[in-house]
Structure formats: C-alpha cells, structure tokens
Amino acid sequence: LADVARVLSTWLQGIRAGALAAVDKAADEGVCQAAFRGVQQALDASPVRRAVTAPPKQPSPRDVAEAYRRSIAADISRFSGMVRALSQRLDGTPRKGEDPDAEVEELGLRCHAAHPRLGGLIRDKSSVLGRQVVKDAVTEPMLQELVELQAEMGSTLEKYDRRFGMGFSQLPSPGAAQETELPPVLPPSPGLNQEQLDEMARLKEDVAGLQAERLRLRAQVEEQRSQGMRMANELKVELQAQLEAVAGERDAFRELFEQEQSERRVVRDELQALKGNIKVVCRVRPPLRGEPPERAVSALRDNESLVVEGGGTKGHRFRFDHVLGSASSQADAFAQLAPLVEAAIEGFSVTILAYGQTGSGKTHTLLGSGGGDGVAQQAIERLFDGASGCYNLLVSAKEIYNENVRDLLGGGVLDVRLNPVTGRPEAQGEKRVPVASPGEALEVLHAAFDLRVTGRTACNATSSRSHLIVTLHLVAPGEKASSSKLQIVDLAGSERLNQSKAEGTRKEETIKINGSLLALGDVMAALAERQGHVPFRRSKLTHLLQDSLDGQARAAMVVCCAPGEHCRSESVCSLRFAEKVSRAVELGRARRLRPAARGT
C-alpha cells in the first residue's frame, strides 16, 4: 500500500504539472476549453489509471483446469520420486522386527499420506459423482499414470510393512481412510508465481506428514489396546485356573473333614454306648459369704471323685464321669456338655438335667450370675453356630407345678399325650416360638426362669417350687415334626421337709416335688434292672422325659451340691441318687430321631 501511495503521489504531481502547463499554453492562445480536454486525455492515457479502473479478469474454466492439471502433474512427479526412493531403500534382505531409520520412516509416512490422495483423484475422475474440476483437469493418459502410481505405491508400502511390521496393513478401514484423506485442493490462481506454487506444495507435504503421523500414532494406540486386552484375557484365564485349583483343594479338604467327622462320630457313639448314654457330672459350688466355714464335701484331684466327711462317720467317697471342684468355671462345666450339643445337631434328642438341693447352684450353673455365661446360654450359642441354615429353631417353655404342666409362653395348663406322628409323649398345644438368633432364644429362656413359681423356705429365700423344662426344637425345612431337640431341665430343689420346714402351700409343693423326684428314681432303678415295665407315667416329669431316657436319646445330669457341713445330709442324698444313675443306668445305643441335616 505504501508503494502504491508513492506511485499515485508521483503520478498526481506529474498530472498537476502537465495540467498547469497546458492551462498556461491555452491561456496564452486564449483557448481554455482545449486545455481542459487536454487534461482529460492525459488522465485517460495514464497506465496507472487503467490499472486502477480496469475490472478484475475472471479465470475461465479452461484456465482453472489447466492450473489444476499442472498441480496434479507436480504431485505425480513428487509421489513417484518418493516411491522410487522408498523402494530403493527397502531393497536388500529384509529382517523382521528391524527398526527403520529416520529417512525411511519419513518416506513411509509420506507415502501413507499420499496413497489416499491418489485414490481420491482416481475416484473423482472415474465416478459420475466426482468433482468436475478433477474430471476436466485429469486426462486419460494422466489417469493411467495415477492408477499405475497407486499400484506401485501400494506394493511398496506392503513391502515396508513386511519388513518393519507396521504401516500399510495397519491403516484404518476404507471408511476411516476417507475420513483422514487430504481435503480437496483449490485450483491455484493463474496469477501465482512459481515460488508461491512451491511454497504451497511444501505446505501440502507438511500436512500430509502430520496426517501420516496421526495415523501412525493411532495404529500404536490400537496396538497397545489390543495388547492390553490380550494381557487381560490371559490374566483372567490364569486367575480362573487358580480359582478352580483352589476350589478343587477346598472340596478335597471338605471331603476329608467330613470323613474324619463321620469316623469321630462313630467312635464317640461306641464310647458313649459303653459308658452309658446318661453322663453324670458333679459340681461343688464355692462357699457363700456368711456360711459356716466347716466344709463337708471336697473334690479330689483325679477330677472323677469327691469325698463327704463329718457327722462322726467315716468319709464317704463318690465317683462320677467328671467332678468339678469349687474353683471350676462356667467354661469348664460346658466343656463336659459340649459333645451332647453336637449330638443334638447330628439328629439326637438331648436332655441336660440340673439336679440338687435348693441353694446348691443349679440355676447359677445353667444361667450364670456374673461369673460367665451359664451352660444353657453356651449350649444355645453353640447350637445356632452348628444348626443355622440346616434347621429352623423353635423354643417352648413349661413348668411342672404340683403335677400340673403349665405353658409359660402361651399360658394355660397342658395335657401330656402321645404325638400321633412321632409316637412320643409331649405336651399337647404348647406354644413354640420361632427364634432366629441366640439372643432371641436367650430372651425366651430368661423369661421362662422369671415366670416359674418360686417361694421362700428355710433353705432358700427364692426356692424354685417347680420343675422347669425349656426345649429347643430343631425342625428340618419342609418337616412338621422336630428332627431333634435340646431340652434344658432345671429340677426343683430336692430338700426334705424337716430341712425346708415348709408349712401350708410350701409343704404341699415340697411333697409334690419329692414325689416326682422319687418317681424319677424309680424309673432309673427300673432301667438299671432292665425291667419289662418302666413306670414313666408315675409322674408328669417322668412322662415328659420318657423320650429322653428310653434309649433313643442322650442325656447328662449335672448334680450340684453345697460344700458346707450344714448341708451335708442333703448333699449325701443328692450324691447317692447321682451315683445310682452313674453306675446302673445303661440306656443302650442311642438312635437318631431322623438323619442329620445335610452339612452338619
């Protein structure tokens, strides 16, 4: 613009000087109008005026086609040189996996970019829908030259791919190739000089190189993605194989464990049959605060014997399956009863009886009182651990008070009759509460102990005046009758009338309690002598416990006694009864009520 301004300024100054000279001359001659015409002619004759006022010349279609033909011919020449150079560099013995040097790699990338350009020109010339400017520019000989060049370039790129393992075969699909093709090139203006045409050609080559680089990077990304997928699949297969191997080992160990458990149950059943199916455990409670210090009952170190001394008589020694001294814990007590809980899970009917005089520690042994969980609580928790998922558990609670069976959960008095399905005696119509956790079962247990009848006697301020029976029924899914059961029986205190000094209602309760305990002793004696008739129906207690003592069940009697001299006579009575049970009662081999649930 500055140059044009200077030219225009010089031209205007020349025009002004010529015009002034013409005016002076015309004035001298007296012809002004001729001077003005001279100025006009000078302006029209100026070349700058013609260049400024002349309209731009529009290129004809023929000129456009000719310019486009020259551009395509230049591309063909350049592409042919690239193909020849790449082909010469690829001659020689190919080595698979060899990395190309920088020059070969650049030639390969430029050929990658040029190949779609050749295909686009051929399609435009051959297709009805092709661009008209290409149809006009490309002649038949030029089309043949493009086809041959495309074939030669494709062959060279395939050789490049076989040698270096990348390139032509990794190009995108035809649709993607069209997407990455060079944009259509506008026909060069006829007014561009050779330097500008060369610059345009270099720019096109740079664009082609960038697009080739993009293709190469995309191919690398796809290769990395494919490699990642392969590695993930291989890792998945490896992990699956490891999981299958671990599952196989787990199944083998489970089979061995179940086999060992089965063998252990057989040995335990045979041992229990030899010892008798009623296990007798004696527990001596510790002295209470305020009791006389004199002791009459002491456990020996062999854990199977205890001795009772005092009263001017020679010490009497008793022997049981196990003896727990006054220093024993609740865990020690439950350890002796745990196998019976396992038997209940395996399908046996199991009963745990707590026997002894009032104040001897029966309730403490069953429920606990600050010194750890009682054996009943531990038995319930172990039962849920082993039976959960295999059985549905229901709880019932009843007491036998003055020879009446009272339902502590549903209320009312129950009658004892034979169940037509199982053939075993049971309290008809008792309420059974489903429980889903040890906590729910323990709530029912504690509620039952709170609802039973208690009263004050000379031996205990809160003496139990009834026999309490809490039963956990294990019912297999789909069954109506119990598959097995665990009964926890807290027998009423076994003191005599002259010791309890009971009067009125308490005296009648004591007579009923002692009568039922005497009936229990008669049943034990009949079983010991293997009599044909066993008097189970003599009391409601023995009638309800018939299926726990008739050879189809397992039972444990925990005999509790006080250590003091003032309780010696009652302790001796309890120990003599327990000794008779331990030595004489053999119920025979226990039988399962039903097959054990699967998984137990």
Image (cartoon, helix red, strand yellow):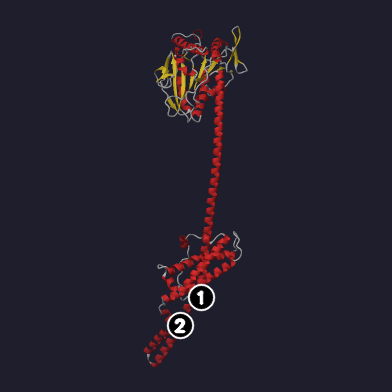
Question: From the viewer's perspective, is residue 239 above or below residue 514?
Answer: below
Q: Is residue 252 visible?
A: yes
Q: Position of residue 335 (x, y in %)?
A: 56, 23
Q: Position of residue 223 (x, y in %)?
A: 53, 55
Q: Position of residue 154 (x, y in %)?
A: 52, 65
Label 1, label 2: how far apart the Cα atoms are: 31 Å
Residue 39: quadrant of the picture: bottom left
Q: Position of residue 520 (x, y in %)?
A: 49, 13
Q: Which secondary structure, mark 1?
A: helix
Q: Is residue 454 visible?
A: no
Badge 2 is on which residue?
11
**Mark closest to the chain's N terminus, 1 or 2:** 2
Q: How many marks?
A: 2
**Disc number placed over residue 194 in the picture, else none:** 1
Q: Is residue 14 left or right of residue 280?
A: left
Question: Residue at 48% of width from left, 67% of height from top?
Answer: 118
Question: Looking at the image, which residue sits at the far left?
Answer: 33
Name the foreground residue: 149 vs 382. Answer: 149
Q: Nearer the viewer, mark 1 or mark 2?
A: 1
Instruction: Tell me which amino acid carries mark 1.
Output: Gln
Q: Is residue 289 left or right of residue 59?
A: right
Name the foreground residue: 32 vs 191. Answer: 191
**Disc number placed over residue 127 in the picture, else none:** none
Mark 1 residue crowding within 10 angstroms, few (<14) / some (14–19) / many (20+): few
Instruction: Tell me which amino acid carries mark 2.
Output: Trp
Question: Looking at the image, which residue sits at the far right?
Answer: 301
Name the foreground residue: 282 vs 374. Answer: 282
Question: Looking at the image, which residue sits at the far front?
Answer: 532
